[in-house]
Image (cartoon, rainbow, N blue to C red):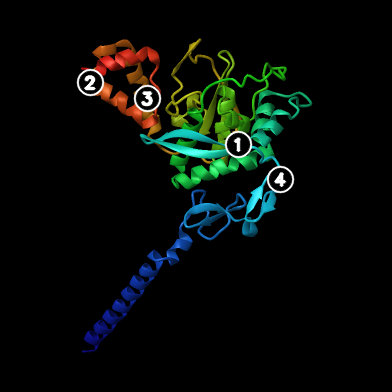
């Protein structure tokens, strides 16, 4: 009888324990658990971000300067932090593709900061290198504070870190490729020409390879990744580098190649360029920032598949199999890739098969 009584008692305790767990779960999923949800930069609900003045509220980063403070180069204005260079605003509409879906992100830029950066002294003292100019352009403190809202917008759009990276890459790739038309102000001893600051590139909504690369490197750096500037001296071409598994990286460097002049798949360094064809020289890799590494993502395999299919469509043309052509079209859609005019007639014929 005693053993039976003990079993009944243990059963009652078990039921009470399960009831407590059920009550806790109901409370958790109806509000209490929101304290443990996170925003796109990893900030917990109800906490200040490491990037003031942002505060995590209901999974979204919002400005709350009265509670989270302002960076030194900004001043308080109610719950916002403002810069003296926030004058003459305009809104730019930026296109990007995420997993086959085309989207837009509107962002306000300011002529006041663009003019300030353009009028900064262009020379650096001492024995300077290409890396010195890159770091100067990317790390300007006034620029950082007015570019951070773009980083926050990306983080508010997607909580997944890899998708944030994909958005940043696609946003920059879809900025039109074009020179500024501004007068050449300086040429360094190693041949480096003056280029726009990343914020100028964004404000002008155009840029050449080096300028767009600096903008993307800034965004990836602020998203927490290890970054690099990849420079091909023979071709005079620049691309961004992001820390990634050595097995998938360019020349086993630990950095994956990202083309910035137009839409392209991360780690694909086998595209052809107008004027010089494929990149053949051994590039210099300038480390810009330390940070986290990409993990095992689908881009690596997609880039290999694209290289194979792109060569096939250019050589076999309309004789390409329908299954391979469908794979090619799927990658075009997934990454928002542009079809060169030289291929448009071939693609039309394949579509009619």
Image: 132 above or below 54: above
Q: x%, y% of residue 76? A: 68, 53
Q: Dot 2: what SS?
A: helix
Q: Could you classify mark 4 by the number of other residues whose Cα lies within 10 Å: few (under 14), some (14-19), or many (20 or more)?
A: few
Of 16 and 200, nearer the camera is: 200
Q: Dot 4: what SS?
A: loop
Q: x%, y% of residue 251? A: 49, 24
| Between marks 1 and 4 in the image, the one whose residue lies nearer the viewer | 4
**Quadrant of the image containing the N terminus:** bottom left
| Quadrant of the image occupied by residue 13 | bottom left
Badges 1 and 3: C-beta atoms under 8 Å apart?
A: no
Residue bearing mark 4:
73
Of 21 and 179, nearer the camera is: 179
Badges 1 and 4: C-beta atoms under 8 Å apart?
A: no
Q: Residue at x 66, y 41 (%)?
A: 86
Image: 64 above or below 277: below
Which badge, 4 or 2, is on the more N-terminal residue? Answer: 4
**Can residue 223 be seen here?**
no
Check residue 289 in the rendering and tell me which mark sits there, or answer none: 1
**Can residue 37 be seen here?**
yes
Q: x%, y% of residue 342? A: 38, 12
Q: Dot 3: what SS?
A: helix
Q: How far apart are labels 1 and 2 at the CA level?
A: 44 Å
Q: How far apart are labels 3 and 4 at the CA level?
A: 45 Å
Check residue 188 in the rendering and tell me which mark sits there, or answer none: none
Residue bearing mark 2:
322
Image: 21 above or below 99: below
Which badge, 1 or 4, is on the more N-terminal residue? Answer: 4
Check residue 304 in the rendering and tell me which mark sits there, or answer none: 3
Q: Residue at x 58, y 32 (%)?
A: 202
């Amino acid at each position: 009888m005693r053993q039976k009584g003990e079993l009944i008692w243990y059963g009652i305790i078990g039921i009470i324990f399960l009831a407590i767990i059920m009550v806790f779960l109901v409370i958790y999923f109806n509000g209490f658990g929101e304290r443990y949800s996170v925003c796109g930069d990893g900030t917990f609900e109800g906490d200040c971000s490491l990037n003031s003045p942002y505060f995590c509220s209901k999974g979204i980063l919002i400005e709350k300067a009265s509670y989270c403070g302002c960076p030194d180069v900004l001043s308080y204005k109610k719950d916002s932090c403002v810069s003296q260079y926030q004058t003459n605003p305009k809104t730019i509409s930026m296109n990007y593709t995420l997993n086959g879906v085309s989207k837009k992100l509107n962002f306000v830029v300011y002529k006041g900061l663009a003019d300030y950066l353009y009028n900064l002294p262009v020379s650096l003292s001492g024995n300077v290198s290409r890396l010195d100019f890159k770091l100067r352009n990317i790390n300007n403190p006034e620029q950082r504070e007015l570019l951070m809202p773009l980083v926050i917008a990306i983080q508010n759009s997607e909580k997944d870190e890899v998708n944030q990276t994909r958005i940043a890459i696609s946003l920059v790739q879809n900025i039109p490729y074009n020179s500024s038309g501004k007068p050449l102000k300086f040429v360094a001893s190693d041949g480096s020409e003056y280029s726009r600051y990343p914020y100028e590139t964004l404000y002008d909504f155009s840029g050449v390879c080096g300028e767009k690369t600096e903008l993307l490197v800034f965004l990836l750096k602020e998203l927490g990744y290890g970054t690099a500037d990849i420079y091909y001296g023979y071709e005079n071409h620049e691309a961004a580098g992001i820390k990634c598994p050595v097995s998938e990286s360019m020349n086993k460097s630990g950095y994956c190649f990202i083309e910035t002049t137009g839409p392209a798949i991360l780690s694909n360094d086998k595209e052809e360029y107008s004027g010089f064809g494929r990149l053949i020289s051994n590039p210099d890799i300038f480390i810009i920032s330390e940070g986290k590494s990409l993990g095992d993502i689908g881009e690596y395999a997609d880039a290999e598949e694209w290289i194979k299919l792109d060569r096939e469509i250019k050589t076999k043309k309309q004789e390409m199999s329908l299954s391979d052509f469908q794979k090619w079209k799927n990658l075009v859609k997934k990454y928002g890739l542009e079809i060169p005019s030289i291929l448009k007639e071939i693609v039309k014929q394949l579509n009619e098969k």
